[in-house]
Amino acid sequence: MMRMTVLASGSKGNSTVISSSRTRVLVDAGLSCRELLKRMLLAGEDPAALDAILITHEHQDHVAGLGVLARKLDIPVYLTEPTHRAWVRMLTPRTTMSYAQWLDHVQQEKEARANAVASATAPQSGICDSMSAAVESASSGTEGASDCAEPEEPESVQKISVKADPTYLPAVEYFRSGRQFSIGDIEITPFTIPHDAADPCGFVFASEGIRMALATDLGYMPPNVKAALKRIDVLLLESNHDLEMLKDGPYPWSVKQRVLSRVGHLSNMATAEFLERDYDGNATYIVLGHLSESNNAPELARLAAEQALVHHPALLGNRILLAEQTAPLVPISL
Ligand SMILES: [Zn+2]
Ligand SMILES: [Zn+2]
C-alpha cells in the first residue's frame, strides 16, 4: 500500500504526505505549523505518526512551517546541504555567511542536539493533546490556542537553543540528487530540477512495488526529469499558469519574466507538451499541482492535460485530479 495526501499546493504553500504501510513522510512544510497540523487531521493523516520531513527547496511556499513543525514533532529533516545552508541564511539576520562560519554553525547545531538529547529527562508536553486542540480549532473554525507555540521558559538546552535560534532542527540528514536513500520501507530517489533555488529537487518514492513522484517548481522539462517520471503510478506534476493569463495578468513585468524563465514554473502548455510527447502513460492518477491562483484556472489546466492524454483514455476523467491551495485533496491510495 502507498498513499499520497496533498495537503496544499500552490504559490501560497505546498505540503504532501507520502506513506507506505509502515512509514510516513511529509514533503515540504509550506504552511504554518498550525495549518499543517489542521490539514493533516482533516485529511485523516496522524501528524504524530510522521517519520520525517523532506524539503524540495528553500522557497517560502515550501518551508514556511518547517522549523516549528520539525521541533514540535521532534522528527528529522532531510534536505540537501545547499538547501539547508540557504534556509539557514534566510532566517539568519546577517545576510552573508562564509563557508567557515557555516561549518561552525553546523558544529554548534550538532553540539546543541547532543546536549538536548543528554538533558532530555523530563517528558515532553504531549503532542496528542495539542493535536486534539488543532482538531477542535479546525472544526470550530477558530484559531488554535497554542498548539504550535514555541516553549517560553528555557527549561532545557534544547529549549534555550530553540529560543535563541529559529534555524534549530531536532535532526538533519543530507541527501544528494541522483543518490537513492531510504526512510523506513520507502526508497527515495531525489532528482535535480531547473528552478531558481540553491539546489532544488523532485522525488520518486517507491515501496511495495508502487512508485509515486512529485515534480513541481520546474522552469522546463529537462531529460533527467522526463527519465525520472517513467513507470510512476501516482504523479504530482506542476501545471502552474496559462500563458495568456500570465501575460495579461496582474504580475509586474519582472515577475512574469521570472515565472516564464527556464528556472521558473511550468505552464499548462509545457506540461501538456510533456504529457503528449514524452510521458509513458503509466500512472493510475495524475495530480496537477502548483496552480497559480492569479494566472491559471483549474478547468484550463485540466483541459490542457486531457487533450494531451487523448491517446491514454484510461487516464481521462476522474484519473486527473487538481491539487488545491486552500484544502487538502482526498488521499490517493494504491
Ligand atoms: Zn520555488
Ligand atoms: Zn513553489
Image (tube, rainbow, N blue to C red):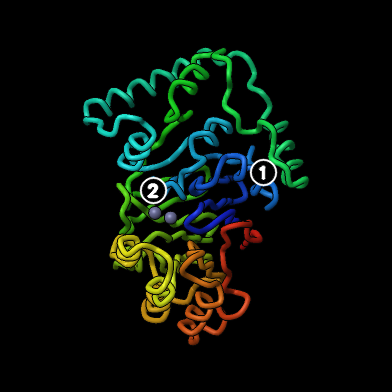
Q: Can residue 2 be seen?
A: no
Asked if labels 2 and 1 touch by Cβ distance under 8 angstroms, the answer is no
Nearest to N terminus: mark 1 or mark 2 = 1
Judged by depth in the image, the label closer to the viewer, 1 or 2, is 2
Residue 155 visible, this orientation: yes
Locate residue 180 relative to residue 95 in the image: left or right: right
Q: Which of 151 and 210 lies nearest the eye of the viewer?
A: 151
Q: Residue furthest bottom?
A: 311
Image coordinates for residue 214, horizontal then vertical, percent:
46, 59
In the figure, is residue 23 to the left or right of 62? right
Q: Quadrant of the C terminus?
A: bottom right
Q: Quadrant of residue 242?
A: bottom left
- The image quadrant where one finds ligand 2 is bottom left
Please give the count of numbered marks on the rendered protein. Answer: 2
Q: Report which residue position mark 1 lands on.
A: 46
Amino acid, disc 2:
His
Q: Is residue 29 above or below residue 301?
A: above
Disc 1 beta carbon < 8 A from ligand 2?
no
Q: What residue is shown at x 64% (from left), y 59% (from top)?
A: 331
Query: Is ligand 1 within 8 Å of the beta carbon of the residue shown at mark 2?
Result: yes
Q: Residues within 10 Å of mark 2 (few under 14, many from 20)?
A: many
Q: Amino acid at mark 1?
A: Asp
* Residue 248 place in picture, x, y as percent: 40, 74
Quadrant where the N terminus sits is: bottom right
Seen from the viewer's position, the closer of residues 103 and 18 is 103
Say which residue appears at 47% left-offset and 60% top-offset.
213
Q: Nearer the viewer, residue 133 or 144?
A: 144
Q: Is residue 76 left or right of residue 49?
A: left
Q: What element does badge 1 sit on?
A: loop
Numbered tag placed on residue 57 in the rendering: 2
Whole-percent x, y for residue 247 in the image = 37, 73
The residue depicted at 56 percent of the width and 58 percent of the height is: 325
